[in-house]
Image (cartoon, rainbow, N blue to C red):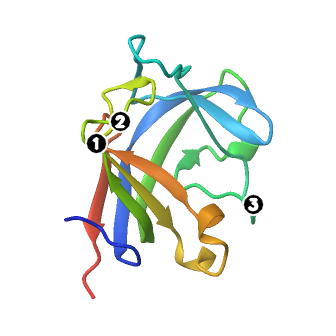
Amino acid sequence: MVPRIGDEVIVSCKSAVARVARVDRYITLEWPWRAVDDSSNFRWNGQVALPHAYSREEWSPYRLEPSGSTLRIGDDCTVSIPPTRLYVGHYEEYRPPRKLGWAPEPTAGLYVVPPERMDLDMEYAGYMLYLGGSDPICVEPLNA
């Protein structure tokens, strides 16, 4: 399936344990699925920052257990995407795979937007997911 803008999809990601590296406006996690690619010109530090709490400006499909408001530096938590109905805001394939500083390199990017944020500026309403790498993200078309 090649998603098109406006398609409805169900997105999910299996859970994994991650360690909290920083807590401020974001919860920064040692990302459990990717490895740093030292051969890349891009320097990724092995961490991903997720919005700390619901914000009109920022959103992420990832969910933390326990919730981000209770986490402190050094805590372990579970990060996942429960099956969630989302809209496709943008889709791009990377040939060759895109060098972003981690391995394996993703082969596609999928920008997803939740239904309740469709009235916002599309550039800021959603979240870019990288597919075809090691993050176990599943995207299924939603049957109309």
At label 2, the amino acid type is Arg
The answer to which of marks 2 and 1 sits earlier in the sequence is 2
The answer to which of marks 1 and 3 sits earlier in the sequence is 3
Q: CA distance from mark 1 to mark 3?
A: 29 Å
Residue under numbered circle 3: 55
Q: Residues within 10 Å of mark 1 (few under 14, many from 20)?
A: some
Q: Can you tell which quarter of the image residue 144 is in?
A: bottom left
Q: Residue at x 29, y 54 (%)?
A: 138
Q: In the structure shown, which secondary structural element does the residue marked by tag 1 occupy?
A: loop
Disc 2 vs disc 3: which is toward the camera?
A: 2
Q: Residues within 10 Å of mark 2 (few under 14, many from 20)?
A: some
Give residue 42's position: percent from left, percent from top.
50, 22
Q: CA distance from mark 2 to mark 3?
A: 29 Å
> Do labels 2 and 1 touch, CB within 8 Å?
yes
The answer to which of marks 2 and 3 sits earlier in the sequence is 3
Judge by depth and name the residue closer to the eye, 102 or 137.
102
Position above or below: 61 against 96: below
